[in-house]
Image (cartoon, rainbow, N blue to C red):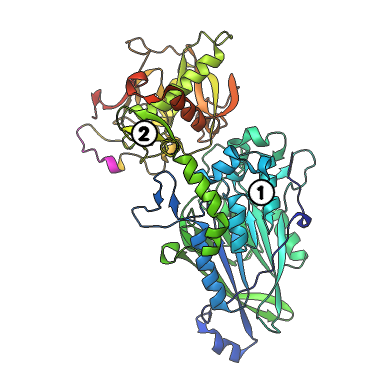
């Protein structure tokens, strides 16, 4: 089922709000500029992105108020307070609120209403729809994580919104037409009384990587053309249909790089859009989880300066863009623009947003605090990036066991089963004693499903070499600083650990030459290049996420079982988590054969 587009399925809210301080026009106070020439007006655009299911300022994995080393806060309730302050401050003058995507995935709250009590079955309004409707957004762009739970749930969520959901480059594979609303043009009043109106075009662009990351949900249903080419198509159309200002809400970073290969359009092209597509005034972007208060990119065709901003993640920041506009010969012109980001830790949570989601939040808290098993000792993920730890072996053991059982008696039943897991969390802990659902969810924070493929010994080695680029090169004898042992360009979720073979990673050697020992378990027998293995792997990686070699191949197992739930089920079935049942130390970091630890 592909969601249908069109304004008829939702109510488009009229935006109104208000101006902070007198803007500068080419460095001159607006009042002076108005006295010298045509009157100027101002427009404020507020932007959020990558809220990832955060409504309350709450850490469901710790069952406590959210906090981090920088004392950031999170959640739509915090964002709403800032938005309402700015609306009040601007006293009825034009203010729009946009979101650049990744909204309905990322916390146990979001997962609960996708998996435990899915809104497609219950008819209940999704908590992120409840929260965002109270805040009164003007438009949201679909991020790649919007597709995680399938198109029916996405369509249900969109119908629950009181504002449009945009994705110009999510195209119906059968018809070639947009599957969602590509853009909206909103006519907004620039002043509360008898002020002129201006038509603001908002184009939504989602991430083409969805074709890889959620292949199981979108293959044969949706295709995802490039964000640059899609902007090039729609911006002139929006201008021709009366848009005085064109804004893009893009779920793609500004670096121009991708986590996958050249088989799909660029994952992070926001700066390239600004540079290559004429007619854009500003871009709110997300996906990279970075804070970019203000960036200007010169359009190569027109010389115009395009304003860009990214408001971090999870509701930690709110982007504020301010535009000064003037009507010249019947046409609106932007004469000044600027942006900044505001920290949500400066305000309290909005009580109306909290009230709208209070019951759903309480139900989620109760769910994640259910005890699933008792751990004989404390298991921590703090060292899982650079040491073989029992808690990561727990993931690999469960994955191996599920796949081995499923393939027993098949043509693959006699092959050794390996398993791959990444250290998603540095803070996950199974305490000694009661282990709760939130502890397991904190270890496996993504909604991945389990698959399996067949790889040769040569492919396993190539995969491990690629994974080993995670580490910096450290000469023998050089001090080892664990805080910076990894290459900062490689995120933790793109470093994988294997079980089922024994291997050494020599971090003193160049990338591509680091797997100095790869042997069958408990032996000195090298893994033969033509040996065959079944490899348990998550759907994100198997579909190409991270661009690991060899893994994008036909599955021999895929029952659409969520890995996090498999971990919970295993723990509940046994009642005891004991490392003696699954911990098999099989890899280590070395330098010239000498263990680093």
Residue denoted by label 2:
434
Residue 366 spot, x, y in % from top left: 48, 43
* Disc 2 residue crowd, few under 14, some 14–19, many 20+, Cα 10 Å: some
Q: Are marks 1 and 2 in contact (CB under 8 Å)?
A: no
Residue denoted by label 1:
157
* Residue found at x 58% / y 60%: 283
Q: Is residue 19 visible?
A: no
Mark pair 1, 2: CA separation? 35 Å
Is 151 left or right of 394, judged from the image as shown? right
In this view, the residue in front, 60 or 25, is 60
Q: Quadrant of the N terminus?
A: top right
In this view, the residue in front, 478 or 340, is 340
Q: Is residue 374 visible?
A: yes
Please, what secondary structure does the residue beneath circle 1 have? Answer: helix
Please, what secondary structure does the residue beneath circle 2 have? Answer: strand
Magenta stretch: dominant secondary structure: loop
Magenta segment: 477-483
Q: Residue furthest left?
A: 477
């Amino acid at each position: 089922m592909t969601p249908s587009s069109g304004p008829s399925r939702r109510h488009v809210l009229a935006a109104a709000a208000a101006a902070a301080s007198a803007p500068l026009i080419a460095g001159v106070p607006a009042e002076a500029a108005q006295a010298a020439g045509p009157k100027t007006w101002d427009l404020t655009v507020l932007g959020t992105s990558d809220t990832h299911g955060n409504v309350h300022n709450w850490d469901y994995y710790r069952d406590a108020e959210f906090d981090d080393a920088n004392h950031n806060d999170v959640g739509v309730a915090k964002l709403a307070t800032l938005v309402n302050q700015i609306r009040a401050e601007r006293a009825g003058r034009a203010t729009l609120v946009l979101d650049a995507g990744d909204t309905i995935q990322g916390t146990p709250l979001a997962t609960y209403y996708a998996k435990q009590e899915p809104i497609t079955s219950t008819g209940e309004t999704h908590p992120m729809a409840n929260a965002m409707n109270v805040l009164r957004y003007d438009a949201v762009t679909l991020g790649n994580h919007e597709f995680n739970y399938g198109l029916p749930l996405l369509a249900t969520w969109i119908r629950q919104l009181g504002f449009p959901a945009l994705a110009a480059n999510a195209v119906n594979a059968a018809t070639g037409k947009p599957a969602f609303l590509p853009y909206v043009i909103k006519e907004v009043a620039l002043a509360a009384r008898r002020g002129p109106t201006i038509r603001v075009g908002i184009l939504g662009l989602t991430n083409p990587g969805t074709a890889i990351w959620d292949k199981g949900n979108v293959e044969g249903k949706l295709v995802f053309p490039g964000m640059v080419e899609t902007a090039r198509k729609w911006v002139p159309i929006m201008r021709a249909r009366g848009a005085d200002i064109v804004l893009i809400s893009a779920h793609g970073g500004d670096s121009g790089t991708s986590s996958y290969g050249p088989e799909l359009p660029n994952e992070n092209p926001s700066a390239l859009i600004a540079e290559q597509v004429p007619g854009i005034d500003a871009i709110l972007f997300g996906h990279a989880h970075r804070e970019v208060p203000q960036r200007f990119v010169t359009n190569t065709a027109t010389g115009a300066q395009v304003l860009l901003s990214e408001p971090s993640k999870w509701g930690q920041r709110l982007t504020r863009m301010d535009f000064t506009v003037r009507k010249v010969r019947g046409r609106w012109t932007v004469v000044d623009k600027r942006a900044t980001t505001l920290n949500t830790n400066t305000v309290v949570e909005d009580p109306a947003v909290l009230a709208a989601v209070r019951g759903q939040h309480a139900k989620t808290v109760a769910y994640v605090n259910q005890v699933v098993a008792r751990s004989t000792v404390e298991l921590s993920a703090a060292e899982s990036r650079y040491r073989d730890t029992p808690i990561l072996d727990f993931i690999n053991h469960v994955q191996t066991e599920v796949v081995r059982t499923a393939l027993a008696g098949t043509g693959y039943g006699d092959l050794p089963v390996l398993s791959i897991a990444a250290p998603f969390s540095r803070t996950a802990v199974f305490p000694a004693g009661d282990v709760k659902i939130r502890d397991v969810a904190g270890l496996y924070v993504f909604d991945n499903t389990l698959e399996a493929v067949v790889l040769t010994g040569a492919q396993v080695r190539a995969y491990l070499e690629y994974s080993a680029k995670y580490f910096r090169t450290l000469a023998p004898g050089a001090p080892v600083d664990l805080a910076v042992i990894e290459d900062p360009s490689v995120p933790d979720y793109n470093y994988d650990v294997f079980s089922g073979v024994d291997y050494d990673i020599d971090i003193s050697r160049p990338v591509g030459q680091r797997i100095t020992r790869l042997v069958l378990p408990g032996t000195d027998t090298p893994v033969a290049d033509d040996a065959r293995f079944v490899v348990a792997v998550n759907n994100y990686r198997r579909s190409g996420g991270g661009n690991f070699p060899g893994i994008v191949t036909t599955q021999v197992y895929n029952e659409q079982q969520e890995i996090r739930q498999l971990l919970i089920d295993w723990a509940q079935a046994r009642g005891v988590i004991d490392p003696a049942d699954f911990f098999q130390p099989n890899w280590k970091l070395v330098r010239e054969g000498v263990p680093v630890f």
